[in-house]
Amino acid sequence: MNLSLRKLGIAPNAWMVNQETADITRPPLTPQPVILPTETKTLRLDLAKTAILVIDMQNDFCHPDGWLSHIGVDVNPARQPIEPLQKLLPRLREKGVPVIWVNWGNRPDLLNISAGLRHVYNPTGDGVGLGDPLPKNGAKVLTKDSWAAAVVDELKQEPEDICVDKYRMSGFWDTPLDSILRNLGKTTLLFAGVNADQCVMCTLQDANFLGYDCILVKECSATTSPEYCWQATLYNLKQCFGFVTDLETVLEALRKLNQ
């Protein structure tokens, strides 16, 4: 009896199976090679193996009514990546590059958050810290499914986008991000979001440690920290962890694809 094969799993990490056979060859992705200049080297990369991580472009970090603003931080620098991302993300989606939103969204009960971590964000214990309601709108700080943890309205999320909640500065720590990327066959990661010297850098470092190729798109990332923190981030990234490029260079590489 000839039984047809059915796909089991998510391409490209999928098998074809029936009662008698399991085809585990996993057909390769169709390559989409592009040339991308960076500040240190010119890269030849495969868009078919590329994803972009957009980190913490959420209300608590980027909105005037969010948590950072409440504790006295000027969030205008954190809003700078919004317009560049509005230009970049649609172009990447057109080429089939997954957009992965990595937002800080704690469990409401904070069972996986230690006292030491809570102390960083509420050192006196009587301030507005993790899980506490914001005075202006009652949204709970960095809590999953709250307004505080939602992506800012100016950045449109599409149904095909992927969302990952994180609980530390690194998007890889205790999250399914690595499993998702490996299931999708992604080995090259573009990085965007805030803060560049904190959550973006921590996520990028962990990605490097896990074997991913890492590229920061400068205009699509920013920090509310002092300028020297931004400069140190760029230096360390280029020295140890990956590559740095700019928005127009990425857009030009995408325009040249399939020409």
Image: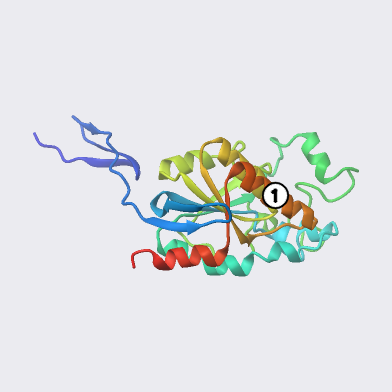
Counting other residues with Cα less than 10 Å from the Cα at mark 1, is it few (<14), some (14-19), or many (20 or more)? some
- Image quadrant in which you'd find residue 25: top left
Vertical arrangement, residue 10 with respect to residue 35, above or below: above
Residue 179: % across, % down: 48, 38
Q: Secondary structure at mark 1?
A: helix
Left or right: 223 in relation to 121: left
Left or right: 31 in relation to 122: left
- Image quadrant in which you'd find residue 94: bottom left
Residue 104: % across, % down: 66, 49
Query: Which residue is the site of mark 1?
Result: 233
Residue at x 60% of width, y 36% of height: 174
Could you say which is closer to the camera, residue 16 or residue 222? 222
Residue at x 60% of width, y 46% of height: 165
Residue 96: % across, % down: 40, 58
User: Is residue 171 visible in the rendered structure shown here?
Assistant: no
Residue at x 85% of width, y 45% of height: 122
Residue 51: % across, % down: 48, 52
Left or right: 97 in relation to 115: left
Q: Residue furthest left?
A: 1
